[in-house]
Image: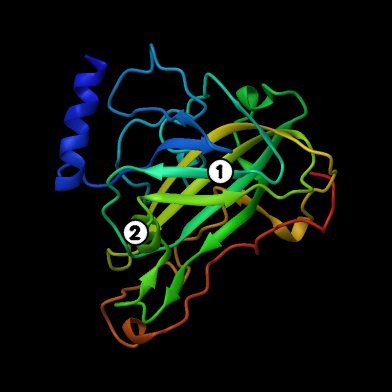
Amino acid sequence: MFLFLLSIIAVLLPLGAVGHGGVWNYSIAGDWRPGFFPYYPAEGQSSIQRHWADFRPIVDVRLPTLVCNDPGGYAEEYATVAAGAEIEAYYRGWPHDIGPVIVWMAYCGAEPTSCSSFNGTGRHWFKISQAGLLSGTMRNGVWAQKQMMANNFTWSVTIPERLRSGAYLMRHELIALHVPFSPEFYPQCAHMYVLSNGDETPGQEFLASIPGVWVDDDPELHLSIYEEPTASRTEWAIPGPPVWSGQYSEEL
């Protein structure tokens, strides 16, 4: 029954019948791990990814579901990964090519299973990667989501090499900007246990609260790419703190 349902979803996704999507699988330093499959009961599934129910976007930036999607239930497993390793996230059949790709992390605790009791709300989050408008205009240019689609629906990120050891949530977030004045948020979280020889942590200037980092009236999110002067803009500033890649330390 499970494989049958997955085959139905796989057929519908390219046709746009389901509409949106999210991360389906992760490659952890070359080792592929399944994500949580929406539209199927949680019972019987075992994944490093927190639970999400369907492909619908989150449009209210004040909701706690912005953290790790809806319902955001804790993952059954975690992945052990070395600092400095590459993580690939695979989005099956993602249909939108206008908007950024942002990857966040949040420290859960020192024990490998610490994320199983950490809900993620609050000022814990730091970006390890972000990409927005890569070239051209906001209306007709190349956005990070278009690049992800061209790269077999896969987005790669490297864990900062000097990040201190511990349990972390890794949060992939797509923000779709194709609907005028109504940005759509698509987050998924995975449980990671990072092993490192480093001891660095991001300073306060790199930390953000989720929910809280996005606001309803942010001009870089609530806009229409189809109208001038926005359509012809060649620069777009990704809201939120800068990316942290190491060197700046402060207790989390």
**Residue that label 1 marks:** 87
Q: Is residue 178 left or right of residue 219?
A: left
Quadrant location of the N terminus in the rendered image: top left
Q: Position of residue 183 (x, y in %)?
A: 36, 60
- Count of residue discs: 2
The coloring applied to the image is rainbow
- Relative to 121, is 143 above or below? below
Quadrant location of the C terminus in the rendered image: top right
The residue most toward the top is 44
Q: Is residue 32 left or right of residue 21?
A: right
Crowd around label 1: few <14 · some 14–19 · many ≥20 (10 Å): many
Q: Quadrant of residue 56?
A: top left
Q: Quadrant of residue 213?
A: bottom right
Contact between marks 1 and 2 (CB within 8 A): the answer is no
Residue at 71%, 50% in the rendered image: 160
Q: Position of residue 186 (x, y in %)?
A: 40, 47
Q: Position of residue 82 (x, y in %)?
A: 70, 37
Amino acid on which disc 1 is placed: Ile
* Residue 60 appearing in the image: no
- Relative to 153, is 54 above or below? above
Give the secondary structure at mark 2: helix
Give the secondary structure at mark 1: strand
- Relative to 167, is 205 above or below? below
Amino acid on which disc 2 is placed: Ala
First-in-chain label (1 vs 2)? 1
**Residue that label 2 marks:** 150
